[in-house]
């Protein structure tokens, strides 16, 4: 089944939170705390005109603390944060968003830093990306699209 997903880039506005104040259906608190808006690219993921997910990417990826993952650093695009709205989960939207990112950035290798156990499951088991543990174990694992 093909989804009519659209990644809508949110324009940068000085002093404004990229996703505004309505966080209904989202559980991560990072939407309120993204401070360096010039560093990140923020997207609303739309499906048939309805926002179904939020995504933040980062052009700069630092993988030195993740052992062999450093070999992928130069061509990587980091998925900094990503969440599908609660009422749209388990419908294939996460996979479709990743596929769309791969289509839009064919020369980049996608990297995601885990946020919690659910994201570990999604990136590792769900997407089949390679898991790299942080050497000092202070940070959650990184997952790299290796194929």
Image (spheres, helix red, strand yellow):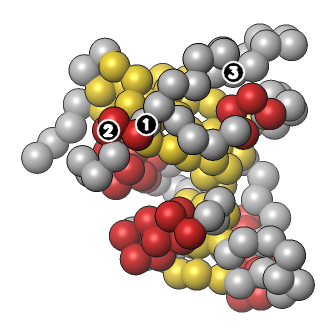
- Secondary structure beneath dot 1 equals loop
Measured as percent of width and height from the top left, residue 5 is found at: 31, 32
Q: Are the residues tagged 2 and 3 within 8 Å (C-beta)? A: no
The quarter holding residue 40 reads: top right
Q: CA distance from mark 1 to mark 2?
A: 5 Å
Measured as percent of width and height from the top left, residue 66 is found at: 77, 81
In this picture, is 144 found above or below 101?
Answer: below
Measured as percent of width and height from the top left, residue 138 is found at: 86, 76
Measured as percent of width and height from the top left, residue 55 is found at: 56, 39
The quarter holding residue 56 reads: top right
- Secondary structure beneath dot 2 equals helix
> Residue most toward the left?
1
Q: Which is more foreground, mark 2 or mark 3?
A: 2
Quarter of the C terminus within the rendering: bottom left
Q: CA distance from mark 2 to mark 3?
A: 21 Å
Residue 145 in sight here = no
With 68 as the anchor, is 144 left or right in this view?
A: left
- Secondary structure beneath dot 3 equals loop
Which residue does the image show at 47% across and 31% down from the upper left? 25
Q: CA distance from mark 1 to mark 3?
A: 16 Å
Q: Residues within 10 Å of mark 1 (few under 14, many from 20)?
A: some
The residue indicated by pointer 3 is 18
* 107, 99: nearer the viewer: 99
Q: Residues within 10 Å of mark 3 (few under 14, many from 20)?
A: many
The residue indicated by pointer 1 is 85
With 70 as the anchor, is 85 left or right in this view?
A: left
Q: Which mark is residue 88?
A: 2
Q: Earlier in the sequence, mark 2 or mark 3?
A: 3
In this picture, is 35 found above or below 83?
Answer: above
Q: Are the residues tagged 1 and 2 within 8 Å (C-beta)? A: yes
Q: Are the residues tagged 1 and 3 within 8 Å (C-beta)? A: no
């Amino acid at each position: 089944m093909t989804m009519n997903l659209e990644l809508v880039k949110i324009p940068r506005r000085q002093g404004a939170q990229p996703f505004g104040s309505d966080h209904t259906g989202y559980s991560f608190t990072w939407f309120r705390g993204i401070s360096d808006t010039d560093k990140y690219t923020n997207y609303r993921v739309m499906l048939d005109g309805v926002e179904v997910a939020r995504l933040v990417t980062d052009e700069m990826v630092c993988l030195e603390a993740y052992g062999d993952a450093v070999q992928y650093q130069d061509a990587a695009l980091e998925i900094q944060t990503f969440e599908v709205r609660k009422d749209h989960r388990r419908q294939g939207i996460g996979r479709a968003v990743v596929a769309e990112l791969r289509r839009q950035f064919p020369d980049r290798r996608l990297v995601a830093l885990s946020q919690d156990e659910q994201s570990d499951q999604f990136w590792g088991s769900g997407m089949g990306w390679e898991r790299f543990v942080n050497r000092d174990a202070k940070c959650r694992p990184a997952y790299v699209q290796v194929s």
